[in-house]
C-alpha cells in the first residue's frame, strides 16, 4: 500500500506548510507523491506558489513527481448520490415514485454535511488503496493511473479531522442500512416477477451493487488510515498553551481510535536567534518552557522543531528548508 502521512491540529498552526514541505522533500528524492488538501479553506496552492484545483495533477514547475489536489465536497457528494440513485432504481422497479425532481430535492439544496471528509476518503481509496488492496489506484486514468509512493494529507482543523476519521464507521452503518433496504425492495420485486414470468424474470439482472461498492471503498480508506505499517498521523502545534492542550486531546482521541500517531511537529519555534532585545529573549524563554512542557506531556513521542520564519511560509526554497526536517 502507498504510504500515508497525515498532518492535523488546531487551525492556524501551519499544517498546510508542513504537508507541502513533506511532499516536496519526498518528490525531491525521486518519489511520486500526492499532497491532498482536505481543508475547506484551501491554501495548499498558496503554499506551493501554484494554482491547485480539484483534480489531481502533476506540478512539474515545482518538482517532477509532485502531484496535488484540493478536494471539494462535490467529490464526496457524488459518492452519496450513487447510493441514492441505486435506491431510487429499486424503488422505481417496485412501482414507487422517485423521479429526477425528487433527486434534485435531495441534492439541490446544497452540499451534504461531511462532503469534504467523504471526498478525502474517496480520493484516498482511489489513489492509496485499490480494490484488492495492492495500491495501484487511479482506475479512471487520472495522474497516469500509476501508483503513488506516498500520499500526504493536509487535514482541516481538529474537529474536521476527527470527523474524517469517524466517517468510515458512520458511513458503514448508514450504507449497511441502505443496502438492507435495497435488498428488501429487490426481493419483493423479484418475488413478484417470478410469479408472473417464472425463471426468465432473473435473466440479465446481474449488475454491480453500487451501495456495496461505495461502502467497500470507504472501508478501504478507513483501514488505510489505521494501518500502523503504512500510515503516520503527525499532530502540528505551536508553543502556546491552547495549542498544546488541543494537541493532547487530539493525540488521546487518535490513540483511542487506533490511528497511528508518529512524531509531533512544533512549528514557529523561536530559538537561538542571537537577538539581544528583551522581547526576543522573553519569547525564546517562553518557547523553551512550552517545548519542555510538550516533551513532558508526550514523553514517548519524537518532537520535531521547525523555526519561526521571517515573512510568509511559502515558496519552494522555504519548503525545502523545512522539508529536510520532516521527510
Image (spheres, rainbow, N blue to C red):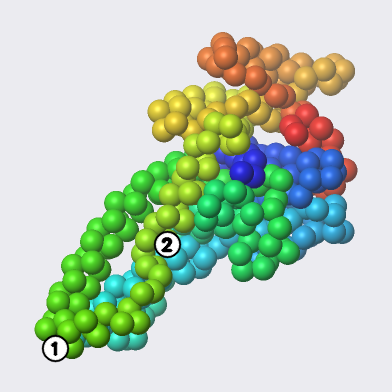
- Left or right, 157 with respect to 93, comes to right
- The percent coordinates of residue 37 (x first, y second) are 62, 52
Tag on residue 196?
1
Instruction: Residue 115: give x, y in percent of width and height.
Output: 45, 60
The one nearer the camera, 166 or 248, is 166
Q: Residue at x 40, y 44 (%)?
A: 166
Q: Which label number is shown at residue 213?
A: 2
User: Mark 2 and 1 residues: CB-CB less than 8 Å, in contact?
Assistant: no
Residue 294: % across, % down? 59, 17
Note whether 314 is above or below 283 in the view shown: below
Bin the neighbour count of mark 1 within 10 Å (Cα to Cα): few under 14, some 14-19, many 20 and up: few
Look at the image and tell me whether residue 161 can be seen.
yes
Q: Is residue 13 above or below residue 156?
A: above
Q: Nearer the viewer, mark 2 or mark 1?
A: 1
Residue shown at 34%/86% (left/top)?
A: 100
Q: Secondary structure at mark 2?
A: helix
Task: Name the element at disc 1.
Answer: helix
Amino acid at each position: 500500500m502507498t504510504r500515508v502521512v497525515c498532518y492535523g491540529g488546531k487551525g492556524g498552526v501551519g499544517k498546510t506548510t508542513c504537508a507541502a514541505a513533506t511532499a516536496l522533500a519526498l518528490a525531491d528524492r525521486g518519489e511520486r507523491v500526492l499532497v491532498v488538501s482536505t481543508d475547506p479553506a484551501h491554501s495548499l496552492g498558496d503554499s506551493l506558489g501554484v494554482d491547485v484545483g480539484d483534480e489531481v495533477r502533476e506540478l512539474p514547475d515545482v518538482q517532477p513527481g509532485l502531484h496535488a489536489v484540493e478536494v471539494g465536497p462535490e467529490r464526496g457528494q457524488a459518492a452519496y448520490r450513487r447510493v441514492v440513485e441505486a435506491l431510487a432504481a429499486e424503488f422505481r422497479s417496485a412501482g414507487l415514485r422517485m423521479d429526477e425532481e425528487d433527486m434534485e430535492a435531495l441534492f439541490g439544496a446544497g452540499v451534504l454535511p461531511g462532503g469534504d471528509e467523504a471526498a478525502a476518503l474517496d480520493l484516498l481509496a482511489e489513489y492509496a488503496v485499490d480494490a484488492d488492496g495492492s495500491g495501484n489506484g487511479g482506475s479512471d486514468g487520472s495522474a497516469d493511473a500509476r501508483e503513488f509512493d506516498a500520499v500526504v494529507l493536509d487535514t482541516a482543523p481538529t474537529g474536521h479531522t476527527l470527523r474524517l476519521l469517524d466517517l468510515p464507521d458512520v458511513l458503514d452503518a448508514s450504507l449497511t442500512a441502505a443496502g438492507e433496504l435495497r435488498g428488501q425492495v429487490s426481493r419483493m420485486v423479484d418475488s413478484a416477477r417470478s410469479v408472473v414470468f417464472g425463471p426468465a424474470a432473473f435473466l440479465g439482472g446481474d449488475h454491480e451493487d453500487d451501495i456495496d461498492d461505495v461502502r467497500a471503498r470507504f472501508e478501504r480508506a478507513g483501514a488505510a488510515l489505521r494501518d500502523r505499517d503504512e500510515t503516520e498521523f503527525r499532530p502540528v502545534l505551536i508553543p502556546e498553551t491552547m495549542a498544546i492542550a488541543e494537541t493532547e486531546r487530539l493525540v488521546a482521541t487518535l490513540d483511542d481510535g487506533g490511528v497511528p500517531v508518529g512524531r509531533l511537529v512544533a512549528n514557529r519555534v523561536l530559538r537561538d536567534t542571537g537577538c539581544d532585545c528583551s522581547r526576543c529573549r522573553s519569547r525564546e524563554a517562553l518557547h523553551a518552557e512550552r517545548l519542555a512542557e510538550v516533551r513532558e506531556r508526550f514523553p514517548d513521542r519524537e518532537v520535531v522543531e521547525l523555526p519561526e520564519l521571517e515573512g510568509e511560509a511559502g515558496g519552494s526554497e522555504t519548503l525545502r528548508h523545512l522539508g529536510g526536517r520532516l521527510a
